Structures are given as structure tokens and as C-alpha cells.
Image (cartoon, helix red, strand yellow):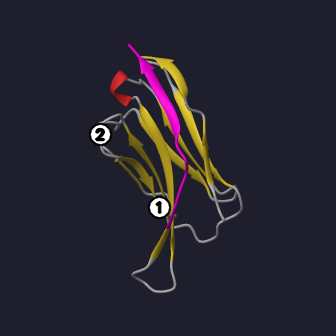
Amino acid sequence: QVQLVESGGGLVQAGGSLKLSCAASTRIFSIKDMAWYRQAPGKQRELVATISSGGSTNYADSVKGRFTISRDNAKNTVSLQMNSLKPEDTAVYYCKWTRPGPTVNVNYDYWGQGTQVTVSS
């Protein structure tokens, strides 16, 4: 059973930075998209950033210009550099990897267990 493991969460003051990383317990081949989601208490999980196998990135409006997603295909990892953190960034952050399934309209998703990020004001 492949597991994704996030690391790098913690407590930081507003305006500070954190870098999250996500790695797999065993190598996963042919990963298409890698993404970071977050879920704040009492709220639905939301997409934060995505990066394709070719390196194209997309960000939620709330984090544009502050967060940077990157991936290392050789090491099979994805990272999220978070700068200028705000209290509203407080949430559990999850990584998700997607790889193609046996047919064109089937994908397999892998999720991490989450890492807590807390930003104090």
C-alpha cells in the first residue's frame, strides 16, 4: 500500500514562512498531477496549488504570489513553499498525487494524512 507522507508543518507567526514536502513510501511511476489541498476547522477541503508532470502550475487566488509549488520527478517529491503566511492560512495541508489508470478516463489518486500549519497573529 503506497502512502504519501507530508512534512514541514508547524506553528509560525504571521508574515513567516514554511516549506511543506510530500514523499511516497514507495516509488510511484507516471504521476500526472501533484497538488496541495488544505482544510481549516469547520470548512471544506480546498485546492491550494497544482503542478502538472510538465511543470505547469495553478494556484488558488488566496495564495497567489505567496505560495510556490514545485516537484522533483527524479526524487518523486512535491513541495509547497509558503511565504507571507496569514492566520487564515491555518489548516491541515494534504498532498494528492494523480496517476493514469488503465483507460483514458480513469485516474488513481493518492492522498497524504495531512500536516498541521498554524499561523498566529
Q: Residue furthest top?
A: 121
Label 1 close to label 2 by CB (< 8 Å): no
The image position of residue 71, as x and y in percent, is: 57, 52
Q: Which mark is residue 6?
A: none
Please report the residue visible at 70 percent of the width from the left and 55 percent of the height from the top: 75
Residue at which label 1 appears: 52
Magenta stretch containing residue 89, yes or no?
no
Which structural element holds mark 1? Answer: loop
Please report the residue visible at 53 percent of the width from the left and 48 percent of the height from the top: 70
Magenta: main secondary structure equals strand
Amino acid type, mark 2: Lys
Residue at which label 2 appears: 43
Q: From the image, which quarter does the C terminus lie in? A: top left
The reply, left or right, for residue 75 in relation to residue 109 is right
State how far apart marks 1 and 2 are (Cα): 26 Å
Q: Is residue 110 above or below residue 81?
A: below
Around disc 2, counting alpha carbons within 10 Å, would you say few (fewer than 14), some (14 to 19), or many (20 or more)?
few
Amino acid type, mark 1: Ser
Which structural element holds mark 2? Answer: loop
Observer-nearest of 19 and 70? 19
Please report the residue visible at 60 percent of the width from the left and 34 percent of the height from the top: 8
The image position of residue 64, as x and y in percent, is: 34, 38
Task: Say whether disc 1 or disc 2 marks the residue closer to the N-terminus.
Answer: 2
Instruction: Mark 1 vs mark 2: give the one in front.
Output: 2
The image position of residue 99, as x and y in percent, is: 52, 70
Magenta stretch containing residue 119, yes or no?
yes
Please report the residue visible at 38 percent of the width from the left and 41 percent of the height from the top: 39
Q: From the image, which quarter does the N terminus lie in? A: bottom right
Which segment did they paint magenta? 109-121
